[in-house]
Amino acid sequence: MNTERRAGVSSESAPLPTRIGWHGLRLDAPADWYLKGYSGDWREGFLQVGSPHSMELDLKWSRTRRKTDLAYVLQQFLTKLERAKRKARQPFHSTLHPVDADCIEFRWRSDERAVGRIQRYPEHHTIVLMQLRSAAKHDALFQQARPMFESLRVAPDPDGWVEWSLYGLHSAAPADFRLEKAHAVTGQTRLVLTRRHERLVLERVARAEQLIKGYEFAEWVDHWLRWRTWRGAREPFTWDENDYGVHLTTRLGLGALATECVVSLCRLRLPAWRVRAVAWLCKPRNTVFHIQHHSPFRSNLLEEVMARTVCC
């Protein structure tokens, strides 16, 4: 495996903003903020980012080619919110501040306070509604909200890649990959992305050195990351004197290949029988990063994803 194009490493020593990347949307938040919840899919969904204190950021998106009236969408949102607050016997007051044809800012006050924005991105057929809420009276919502709102991006990068970033996993994939499964907690994050004939797994395991203690790294990878069902040589590699990993190129076994062929036939796609996988220990973060690529074709996608995975 060519380790010249190794995983991306940040040289900054100061805490950087928390990067949230999800379903093609990218947002920067303060360094101690974290993902609290999510639902939906690439076409329509909801994301919530929280602070260690009283503030929370809600983000809703939809992708559609239909012409949509932003004022109507926003009014529907505020009306539903007002009904919920009044049902809880709380007062509710809101104001709207149109910015241009594709942006309306708003504020509301009840038992909480919030500032928000609904934004249309016509070239990407995307509408995003964001609001920053707080139950505390003295939080400076506007000063906190503005940089987060301005950091939002909905377009792939110039190479056609989008970031997937949460709970310490910061990687990227081509924009046409879609999320199939997600397991996201603070100790372990695992995303399974798919496109037509391919499957890509991005995984992060925290507190790695404690988990690996007493095992050879390749042995631990076989058991913890479930490589034990694959034949083939585990090729070790190192970089930066401390970090090390293992790489595997193999093919599905007969049982797994039969299952893959049946599933592929039902979904009218080619079976992804070629498997390439890599796992490495990032010692400064005490974290193992794990990437798998299943495909019917030869590809260097594994190296490209690894090069875009931020380790430190």
Image (spheres, rainbow, N blue to C red):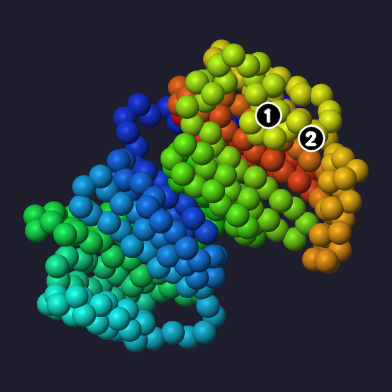
* 136 relative to 8 in the view: left or right: left
In the depicted structure, whether residue 78 falls above or below residue 310: below
* 308 relative to 15 in the view: left or right: right
Q: Secondary structure at mark 1?
A: helix
Residue at 47%, 63% in the rendered image: 39
Residue at 66%, 16% in the rendered image: 216
The one of 201 and 29 positioned closer to us in this rendering: 201
Q: Amino acid at mark 2?
A: Thr
Q: Amino acid at mark 1?
A: His
Residue at 80%, 66% in the rendered image: 267
Residue indicated by mark 1: 223
Q: Residue furthest left?
A: 138
- On the image, the x and y values in percent for residue 292 come to 69, 40
In the depicted structure, whether residue 5 falls above or below residue 180: above
In the rendering, which numbered label is found on residue 229? 2
Q: Quadrant of the N terminus?
A: top right
- On the image, the x and y values in percent for residue 266 come to 83, 66
Residue 89: name its quadrant.
bottom left
Residue at 25%, 45% in the rendered image: 52
Of pointers 2 and 1, the one earlier in the residue sequence: 1
* 25 relative to 217 in the view: left or right: left
- On the image, the x and y values in percent for residue 182 come to 56, 52
* 73 relative to 79 in the view: left or right: right
**Crowd class of label 2 (few under 14; some 14 to 19; many from 20; radius 10 Å):** few
Q: Secondary structure at mark 2?
A: loop
Q: Residue furthest front?
A: 88
The one of 227 and 28 positioned closer to us in this rendering: 227
Q: CA distance from mark 2 to mark 1?
A: 9 Å
Residue 92: name its quadrant.
bottom left
Q: Can the viewer see residue 111 in this picture?
A: yes
Discs 2, 1 touching: Cβ within 8 Å: no
